[in-house]
Amino acid sequence: MAISSKSKLREILEDERAVAIIDEYVPGFVSNPELGPVAGMKMKTLLKFPQVGLPKETVQEIIARLDALDAE
């Protein structure tokens, strides 16, 4: 399965490349035990939550890097 910013969190967590990208910007995010209820949400949506605390530019950079993982 191709990984992108539109992938669900549970799919992101199964891809080491995607986990590395997220962890680079938000250390510990992917290992947070409270993520269970949002595992079915798209990563692009989750990154925009104010609780994540990322500036808009950083969110856009993460989205671009995730989208580039399996781009052809």
Image: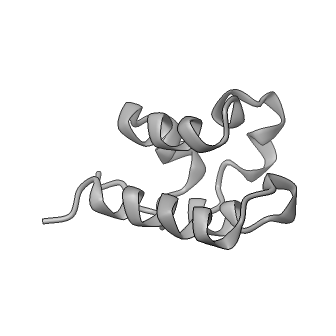
Q: Could you tell me which residue is drawn at 28 percent across and 53 percent down?
A: 69
Q: Could you tell me which residue is drawn at 67 percent across and 41 percent down?
A: 26
* Residue 21 percent location from the top left of the image: 47, 42
Q: Is 72 left or right of 58, judged from the image as shown?
A: left
Q: Is 36 left or right of 2, judged from the image as shown?
A: right
Q: Could you tell me which residue is drawn at 58 percent across and 59 percent down?
A: 43
Q: How many marks?
A: 0
* Quadrant location, the C terminus: bottom left
Query: Which quadrant of the structure image shows residue 50?
Result: bottom right
* Residue 63 percent location from the top left of the image: 48, 64
Image height check: is 37 above or below 48?
above
Q: Is 35 left or right of 20, judged from the image as shown?
A: right
* Residue 17 percent location from the top left of the image: 36, 37
Q: Residue furthest left?
A: 72
Here the colouring is one colour
Along the line of sight, the residue nearer the viewer: 44 or 60: 60
Image height check: is 61 above or below 9?
below
Image height check: is 18 above or below 66?
above
Query: Which quadrant of the structure image shows residue 46?
Result: bottom right
* Residue 28 percent location from the top left of the image: 70, 29
